[in-house]
Structures are given as structure tokens and as C-alpha cells.
Image (cartoon, rainbow, N blue to C red):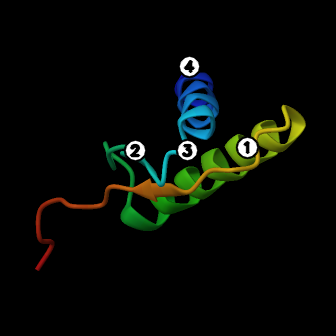
């Protein structure tokens, strides 16, 4: 569902001449940070592949990465 939502946002953004599409890549949940990053990368690569398949080319994703300090 998240991929479909971001695809729609990308399409609408392209129609509007949008500069960026901000999204939250997800929470760690019970995953280690390195595992969460691997999951997020896989998700983003799948999203980019689907956008290309659908001819959506004019987008810039801006992952929102604020959160608690781990130090």
C-alpha cells in the first residue's frame, strides 16, 4: 500500500510541477538500524522500478529522517 501511495503522490507531483515528495521510510520496530536500512533500500528500489514501469520520471523523494538521538 505504501508503494501505491507514493506512486500516486509522484504522479500528482509531476502534474503539479512538485519539487519534492517527503515521506517517512518507516520505524525500526524491533529491527536493528542496519536491518531497517536494508529494508528501506529494498522498498525504495522497488518503488523506483514501479515508477519507471509507469512512465513517471519527474520526482525527487526526500526521506524524513528525524528521530530520537541514539547517543
Numbered disc in front, either 3 or 1: 3
Q: Position of residue 51 (x, y in %)?
A: 76, 39
Q: How dense is the environment of label 1, judged by Cα within 10 Å: few (below 14), some, or many (20 and up)?
A: few
Image marks 1 and 4: residues in contact by CB distance under 8 Å: no
Taking the spot 49% from the left edge, 61% from the top edge, the residue there is 37
Taking the spot 60% from the left edge, 30% from the top edge, the residue there is 3
Numbered disc in front, either 1 or 2: 2
Taking the spot 85% from the left edge, 37% from the top edge, the residue there is 55
Image marks 4 and 3: residues in contact by CB distance under 8 Å: no
Q: Which residue is mark 2?
A: 23
Q: Give the Cα separation between the discs numbered 1 and 2.
A: 15 Å
Residue 27, label in figure:
none
Q: Which residue is mark 3?
A: 17
Q: Give SS at disc 3.
A: loop
Q: Give SS at disc 1.
A: helix
Q: Nearer the viewer, residue 39 or 51?
A: 51
Image marks 2 and 4: residues in contact by CB distance under 8 Å: no
Answer with the quarter of the image where residue 14 lies. top right
Question: Residue 49 vs residue 29: left or right?
Answer: right
Q: Which residue is mark 1?
A: 46
Q: How dense is the environment of label 2, judged by Cα within 10 Å: few (below 14), some, or many (20 and up)?
A: few
Numbered disc in front, either 2 or 3: 3
Q: Position of residue 44 (x, y in %)?
A: 62, 50
Taking the spot 11% from the left edge, 62% from the top edge, the residue there is 68
Where 68 sits versus 28, above or below? Answer: below
Quick one: quadrant of the N terminus? top right
First along the sequence among labels 1 and 2: 2
Residue 1, label in figure:
4
Amino acid at each position: 500500500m505504501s508503494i501505491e501511495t507514493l506512486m500516486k503522490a509522484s504522479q500528482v507531483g509531476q502534474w503539479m510541477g512538485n519539487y519534492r515528495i517527503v515521506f517517512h521510510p518507516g520505524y525500526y520496530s524491533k529491527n536493528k538500524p542496519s536491518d531497517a536500512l536494508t529494508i528501506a533500500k529494498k522498498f525504495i528500489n522497488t518503488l523506483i522500478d514501479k515508477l519507471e514501469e509507469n512512465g513517471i520520471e519527474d520526482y525527487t523523494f526526500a526521506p524524513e529522517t528525524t528521530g530520537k538521538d541514539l547517543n
